[in-house]
Amino acid sequence: LPMVAKIATNDYVGFTFFVGCMAMMAAAAFFFLSMNSFDKKWRTSILVSGLITFIAAVHYWYMRDYWAVNGESPTFFRYVDWILTVPLMCVEFYLILKVAGAKKSLMWKLILLSVVMLVTGYLGETVYRDQAQIWGLISGIAYFVIVYEIWLGGANKIAREAGGAVLSAHRMLCWFVLVGWAIYPIGYMAGTPGWYDGIFSGLSMDVVYNIGDAINKIGFGLVVYNLAVTATSNE
Amino acid sequence: LPMVAKIATNDYVGFTFFVGCMAMMAAAAFFFLSMNSFDKKWRTSILVSGLITFIAAVHYWYMRDYWAVNGESPTFFRYVDWILTVPLMCVEFYLILKVAGAKKSLMWKLILLSVVMLVTGYLGETVYRDQAQIWGLISGIAYFVIVYEIWLGGANKIAREAGGAVLSAHRMLCWFVLVGWAIYPIGYMAGTPGWYDGIFSGLSMDVVYNIGDAINKIGFGLVVYNLAVTATSNE
Ligand SMILES: CC1=C(/C=C/C(C)=C/C=C/C(C)=C/C=O)C(C)(C)CCC1
Ligand SMILES: CC1=C(/C=C/C(C)=C/C=C/C(C)=C/C=O)C(C)(C)CCC1
């Protein structure tokens, strides 16, 4: 017999896992199937948007079953997903600025910072849970440096020189990192012990993370898609 | 109920199996979907990069579950994977040099050597584990002959004559074989008994192999992809 889990009708965590999984699959199909309608210059960026949502779809598939069967947060798989998708989002920043002359070093800097942010976050959520607030702080500093780098550092300079559609896409992605990514620390505080106990403890960590993922992974991809549409029609 | 494995949060072997599996899937999707953006001359090479990572993705899917359920090294599946992917990497050497006039005999020579390398390695890890060091030595000799052949033998001559992007891609692949592939004997020594006991026994064989596979399979493919990008934009 096929193995299907039952989900309680008021299981909101399960609901967001299932909706998230399907939304990621559909987004991946959308990006993969539309990439060839654009000029070569933009295809790789759209392909990477597809990869980000494809990777998420696979992990959400796993996480929704994990949740349905064990009723526990699938923290391990969450971070397996992030350790691949967040660096790929850094690659996106580089790809859209590459046409304007960005260097690979920018990409590697962002990737390194994102790995530090995620590894310290993982340690705080799992192995060193008692010191979650300290690990979260270190993670938050790395996050802050990423925000600085894209808003005010080298990336910003290149985007300003490029102007036009590239600049406005870059700005949109910057907003995603500043506002969209800020959802994650809230989930972290909802799910770990620390000085913030009682402020966020009414929230479910997984619901917060799932909403964050849907906004950031799909939204990010759509910004890139939109850039390709605008740039193609202007030519 | 769907069957989902739980992974301990500090299970680094499990972590590399899961990340590796997803990275291979994403890489395969990347190569398959981008191949048609290039000149026909390069498509087969990129397709083969896709096949190598696709084959690995399927085996990693199996191996990650095998590890999660049994907590043992999936040696059998590891070698099933290698016996297909390593000869395909030899095909890649031939394909990129074919445009410069390489002969099929070069390809068959490399394939034969790689099969000797893998069969002897498998025997040393499993059936004749007590003589692991002798089988490892034979395997290492075959590996050495491959290194010689591509760096100093016939392949090198053809690459030098071709020059340009083909030469530099060939050189990159040569470095992968010399440095990237040298990761594997370290894993072997970490996982089998021999004179090297105590030197490498602090390492986990599977972690070493998984890191090696990620570097070599995806890196190799990206070199070929990069060759196609460079050669296409120069035309
Ligand atoms: C700052 C901070 C964190 C940030 C996490 C972020 C920013 C994750 C982003 C994930 C994305 C964008 C996934 C989508 O693909 C953690 C690790 C929760 C730990 C607490 C402090
Ligand atoms: C020299 C040597 C080995 C070499 C293995 C190699 C070089 C494997 C390469 C695998 C690749 C490149 C897979 C990626 O697709 C063994 C068999 C461990 C046995 C010990 C001696």
Image (cartoon, coloured by chain):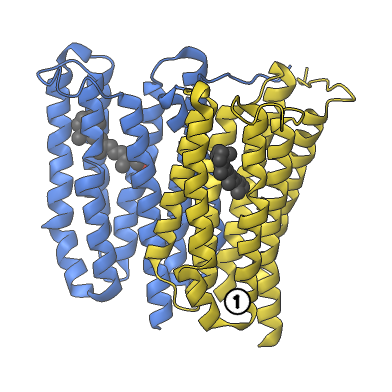
Chain colours: A yellow, B blue
Q: Nearer the viewer, residue A155 or A108?
A: A155
**Chain assignment, label 1:** A
Q: Write down the quadrant of residue B189 in the picture.
A: top left
**Residue B116 x/y as whole percent:** 22, 34
* Residue at the spot 48% in from the left edge and 73% down from the top edge: A98
Could you say whether the residue bearing mark 1 is in a helix, strand or loop? helix
Q: In this rendering, is residue A221 above or below B128?
A: below
Which amino acid is tagged 1?
A: Leu
Q: Write down the quadrant of residue B161 in the picture.
A: bottom left
Q: Nearer the viewer, residue B208 or B110?
A: B208
Q: Which residue is mark 1?
A: A167
The answer to whether one can see residue B68 in this image is yes
Disc tally is 1
Which corner quadrant of the figure contains ligand 2?
top left
* Residue at the spot 40% in from the left edge and 30% down from the top edge: B80
The answer to whether one can see residue A28 in this image is no
